[in-house]
Image (cartoon, rainbow, N blue to C red):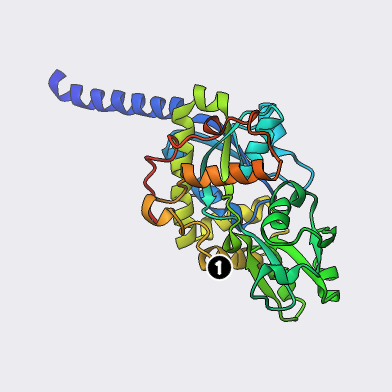
């Protein structure tokens, strides 16, 4: 009888140990996005909904950003382990004393666009237009646009995230995200044209995962696990977004199903997630040459001081290089 009981006891013990180990392995991890929940964050919510973070041994808390939230400052204050942002933004915050490191990216190129009433063959044709620009434009794409696109003497007005002024004035050019503003502009019933700045040479990635240097040093396995599970979430989301969309709608009830669907369609159309180096190296991949182009751009436009922002310390390829999540 003793021999018959031992296997059952052993199996029960092993199951208990496995369950306990699983619980212990559920390491808490806080991720702060750069805006309210939306399609552009869908892969993270999909990973949450599908249990991909849990399977990776993480207990992930996704917190939303917003218009009055400085995600870099909150991360530096210990309110998040990693955040979502422009990799150029990470370089600028480094100069301000926040040692943030780019570890992966969702979008292989920036989703920033200019929206016009007229078709243009060359960006220099826009020099006589008036641009609607948000405050963040002046520390990101606008210095580049002035120096590289011949828009140095162009007039500007504040953009308040309302497309009505653009619709009312044919001489205006509207900044936006390819996944967002075109949806609102289309509601106006007027013809318009969308020009991604990346097509004109704007180098940054979009929606990069950025973490503090200390986090990477102290919790490299957790960061790598978060990156891999997130990219698996993005692959799943682009195939069947239902689970992620449910969490997006719960977190942000103001985000309608039609706009979410538009955002997903635009991400696919412009291959934001699956294009570029992701084609051969996997979703989320970042490379030194691409990151260096952004650093060079910011130095050239005097947005960062090369002596104060050591390029090689502002990124790591180690967190994403082995993820291997192919589109």
Image position, residue 51 (x, y; %) = 46, 44
Which residue corresponds to mark 1? 265
Mark 1 Cα shell of 10 Å, populated few (<14), some (14-19), many (≥20): some
Identify which residue is drawn at 46% across, 44% down. Answer: 287
**Which corner quadrant of the image does residue 14 belong to?**
top left
Say if 259 sits above or below 66 in the image. below
Would you say 2 lies left or right of 138 here? Answer: left
Say if 316 sits above or below 194 in the image. above
- Quadrant location of the C terminus in the rendered image: bottom left
Would you say 299 lies left or right of 167 here? Answer: left
Query: Foreground: 316 or 253?
Result: 316
Residue sticking out furthest to the top = 2
- Quadrant location of the N terminus in the rendered image: top left
Identify which residue is drawn at 45% across, 47% down. Answer: 285
Name the secondary structure under disc 1.
helix
Image position, residue 50 (x, y; %) = 47, 49
Would you say 181 lies left or right of 237 here? Answer: right
**Which corner quadrant of the image does residue 164 belong to?**
bottom right
Image position, residue 321 (x, y; %) = 40, 40
Confirm whether residue 257 shows in the render. no
Query: Foreground: 121 or 36?
Result: 121
Confirm whether residue 324 shows in the render. yes
Image position, residue 15 (x, y; %) = 32, 29
Labels in figure, total: 1
Query: Foreground: 156 or 18?
Result: 156
């Amino acid at each position: 009888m003793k021999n018959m009981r031992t296997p059952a006891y052993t199996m029960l013990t092993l199951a208990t140990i496995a369950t306990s180990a699983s619980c212990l392995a559920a390491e808490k991890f806080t991720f702060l996005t750069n805006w309210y929940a939306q399609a552009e964050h869908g892969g993270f919510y999909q990973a949450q909904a599908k249990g991909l973070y849990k399977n990776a041994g993480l207990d992930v808390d996704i917190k939303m950003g917003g218009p009055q939230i400085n995600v870099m400052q909150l991360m530096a204050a210990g309110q998040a382990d990693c955040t979502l942002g422009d990799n150029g933004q990470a370089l600028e915050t480094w100069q301000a004393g926040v040692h943030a490191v780019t570890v992966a990216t969702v979008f292989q190129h920036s989703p920033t666009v200019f929206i016009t009433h007229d078709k243009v063959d060359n960006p220099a044709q826009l020099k006589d237009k008036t641009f609607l620009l948000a405050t963040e434009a002046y520390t990101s794409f606008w210095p580049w646009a002035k120096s590289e696109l011949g828009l140095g003497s162009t007039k500007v007005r504040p953009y308040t995230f309302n497309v009505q002024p653009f619709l009312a004035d044919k001489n205006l050019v509207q900044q936006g995200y390819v996944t967002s503003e075109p949806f609102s502009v289309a509601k106006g019933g007027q013809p318009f044209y969308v020009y991604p700045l990346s097509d004109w040479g704007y180098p940054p990635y979009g929606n990069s995962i950025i973490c503090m240097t200390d986090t990477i040093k102290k919790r490299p396995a957790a960061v790598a696990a978060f990156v891999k599970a997130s990219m698996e979430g993005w692959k799943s989301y682009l195939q069947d977004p239902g689970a992620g969309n449910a969490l997006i709608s719960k977190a942000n009830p103001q985000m309608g199903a039609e706009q979410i669907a538009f955002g997903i369609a635009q991400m696919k159309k412009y291959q934001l997630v699956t294009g570029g180096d992701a084609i051969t190296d996997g979703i989320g991949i970042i490379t030194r040459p691409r990151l260096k182009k952004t650093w060079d751009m910011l130095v050239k436009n005097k947005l960062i001081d090369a002596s104060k922002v050591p390029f090689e310390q502002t990124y790591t390829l180690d967190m994403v290089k082995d993820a291997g999540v192919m589109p």
